[in-house]
Amino acid sequence: MGGCTRANDRLCADYQLIASLLKLVWEVGEAEVRTLRVLYVTAEIFPLAKVGGLADVSAALPVSLRDQGIDVRLLLPGYPRAMDQAANLRIAAVIDDLLGVGQVRIWKGKVPGGAVPLLLVECPSLFSRAGNPYQDEQGCDFVDNGLRFGLLGHIGAMVAAGEAGLPWRPDLVHVNDWHTALLPLMLRVRPEPQPPTLLAIHNLAYKGAFPADVLQRLAVPAAGRASAAIDCDNQVSFLKAGICAADQIVTVSPTYATEILTAEYGCGLDELLRSRSTAIHGILNGADYDIWDPACDPYLTVRYDPRDLSKKQACKSAVQEEMGLAVEAEVPLVGFTSRLVWQKMPEIVLEALTALLSEGIQFALVGEGDRGHEAKFRELAAAYPGRVGVRIGYQETIAHRLLAGADMILNPARYEPCGLTAIYGMRYGTPPIARRTGGIIDTVVDAQPQNVVDGSATGFLFNDVNANEMVSCVRRALQLYRQKTAWHRIQIAGMRRDFGWARSARQYADLYRQMTEGLSLPIRLRGGNVKRRVVQRAPGHSLRGKRTNIKVGQGRKKWKPSEQRLFVSVPTRYGRNKAESTATTSSTGSRQKPN
């Protein structure tokens, strides 16, 4: 060709870039660029430790991210059950007497039944206890939770900074809720460069508040302790520290991402969150349909799918018998699987049941939480034998069977970051009854008459936090329950909604790549050492070449959209230590000097 037309300038530039890269690969000898490395730090993961939805997310999201080509590895406290059930455990590192709690050992293994690599932090004095990850067997918070999860943050920061003696170091750290939110601060007080951090807020109300001296006990440097940003109600808030220190923040639904910027839902942190609004994203949680699907659920005696809902009746009979209810096919069964905490409105549910039980329904609860609420639900079951069934203490198996056997599932909340129960209920053909807030707005379509007719309705929504609103909503559901054709249409619409993790994982992958854009990432040269590379792309473009609306925080160097750059350090066996192969191609196809 004699030259390039203006329309073909960019295409020619791309060809020249590819040619330069191929020549570089040939020169340095079979280069292999590895995938993005992410350390995913969490306090819960199913089946090793579960209190709420965080465990389900931590179990499913990393699997989907690995399907996206990302090298995700989990970091979790070494609870007794986790140490017993994790697969292929072997010691990866030993840290002597960190924070005066005795020897800490990092074990390397796999999540049982999966392929996700797992790092367990074994510290018997802090994690080998009866109860759940946060509370003892009497339901009281462990008094040293600040030290326990502060240690987890320390270990995570050491792994991220390459100080733990492990051969693997992440390019990005993804932390979850207050339990791990101190980690971004611990990286901030270290010398740069350090991996960027993403804080996922699953529930803003749980701030991780502790006495101010906990930072000194955790050996946080003075620069971190002096920050006024982590002072919350005269206490230290781990979550607030993470909000200030993390590079980017994500919530578990788009609507919740906007709600937390308001005084009503901001839990006293709304002003701070508004100051960081350009760094906040909302990515809807997904459902792991390998586990939560009645077509393949291993906990069900009878399985079913949208093609034949008649088998759901057998699930109803089974759960009625298991919960001590009268086995009656035509009586509507309302399920409630929940933590019994203020957020989930248990006192409103109790008040509403006083009116609803007189209308001939059955009610079944599987959950745990506030001891006072637990006692009141037990009293209700005693007052209505055969009509009310209560199972205190969360059990994964019965939770699945209740979702399959109930006719409708209660999912009320004063605020709802995502609402996995509603998502699960829809897949099981058990329409949710929920308050219109947070992630519920993003997932459930209310059964208004037009929505029922056009087949889009998937559940029932109410607005206000009071028993009258809930009762009216349940009565609306009961009215449609007796209209078999309309009810079947609502069930099918919900079962066909797809909230699988693939879409959400792609959004997380795009965010990760945007956050690491411009950072030095390794390129492995076979027969040589691991060196570093920097790949720059036009802002606003994902690695797959699609535009994205993800916003990236301030402080990173911006490149001209017309430029793409690749810097590679070659092994010392070639006699050169510096990055000496640099290709810069402009949109005009001319070569320029590197900066």
Image (cartoon, grey):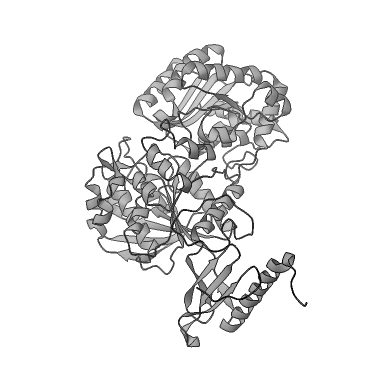
Q: Residue furthest right?
A: 1
Q: Is residue 271 left or right of residue 511?
A: left
Task: Please identify the quadrant where the N terminus is shown.
Answer: bottom right
Q: Residue at x 47, y 35 (%)?
A: 259
Q: Is residue 586 above or below residue 281?
A: below
Q: Is residue 390 left or right of residue 20?
A: left
The answer to whether residue 176 shows anywhere in this view is: yes
361 or 32, which lies in front? 32
Q: x, y percentage for residue 127?
A: 32, 50
70 or 261, which lies in front? 261
Q: Is residue 199 above or below residue 304?
A: below
The answer to whether residue 324 shows anywhere in this view is: no
423 or 505, which lies in front? 505
Q: Residue at x 56, y 55 (%)?
A: 510
Q: Is residue 137 above or below residue 514?
A: above
Q: Quadrant of residue 475?
A: top right
348 or 251, which lies in front? 251
Q: x, y percentage for residue 371?
A: 35, 28
